[in-house]
Image (cartoon, helix red, strand yellow):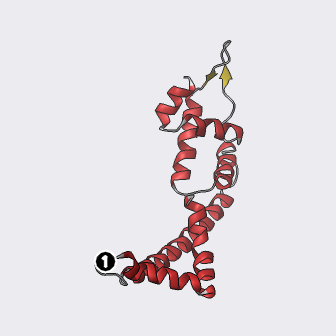
Amino acid sequence: MKIGELSTASATPIETIRYYEREGLLPPPARTGGNFRIYEPPHLERLQFIRYCRGLDMSLDEVRVLLRFKDEPSGDCGDVNALLDEHIGHVSRRIKELRSLERELKELRLRCGAARAADQCGILAGLAEAAQDPAAATAATKEHSHLRSVHGH
């Protein structure tokens, strides 16, 4: 199948497929005489595996490790267990960060119960106050920077 067909079959953008190839996550496909990539069913299976792992919020490095074990099926999977345990810890920390962020946003939301002129908005005033407090601004930036980096915001 050509890259467009692989893209459709896996619900993966073409650029992502090419990126995974450059990163060595997908093996290079065979090429036709016209230099078109030709993918086989194992490419689709591997791409679906990668996409599922990414859906579980695993990093490309984590996926790379899992693929190495998948490629060596007779190896010991103890490191796979350790990787997953570490990822679970990471997810637990993120959940804690998200709960903290939710509390902070809810407290901020309570500052403005009704629509009014922007210069009377309790939310905007609260944001401005917090931004002026170096300790609060540093804590908020530090605590939530991981969430922004993970989600690309």
Q: Does residue 98 appear left or right of residue 28 in this picture?
A: left
- Please identify the residue farthest to the top as the structure is shown: 33
Q: Is residue 67 above or below residue 121?
A: above
x and y, in percent, of residue 39 in the image = 59, 26
Say few, some or many: other residues with alpha carbon within 10 Å of mark 1 (under 14 / 14 to 19 / 20 or more).
few
Quadrant position of the C terminus in the picture: bottom right
Identify residue for label 1: 116
Q: Position of residue 103 (x, y in %)?
A: 43, 81
Total count of labels: 1
Q: Residue at x 64, y 62 (%)?
A: 83
Where in the figure is residue 22, as x and y percent of width and height? 71, 38
**Left or right: where 57 falls relative to 70:** left
Residue lying at 52% horizontally and 38% vertically, measured from the top left = 12
Kindly identify the amino acid type of the residue bearing the numbered disc 1: Arg
Q: Residue at x 70, y 47 (%)?
A: 68
Mark 1 element type = loop
Name the spot of residue 91 as percent of width and height, x first.
54, 68
Q: Is residue 72 or residue 39 the one in the foreground?
A: 39
Q: Residue furthest left?
A: 114
Question: Is the residue 89 above or below the residue 112 in the image?
Answer: above
Q: Is residue 74 above or below residue 136?
A: above
Dividing the picture into quadrants, the one containing residue 125 is bottom left
Name the quarter where the N terminus is drawn.
top right
Residue toward you, 118 or 23:
118
Q: Quadrant of residue 149?
A: bottom right
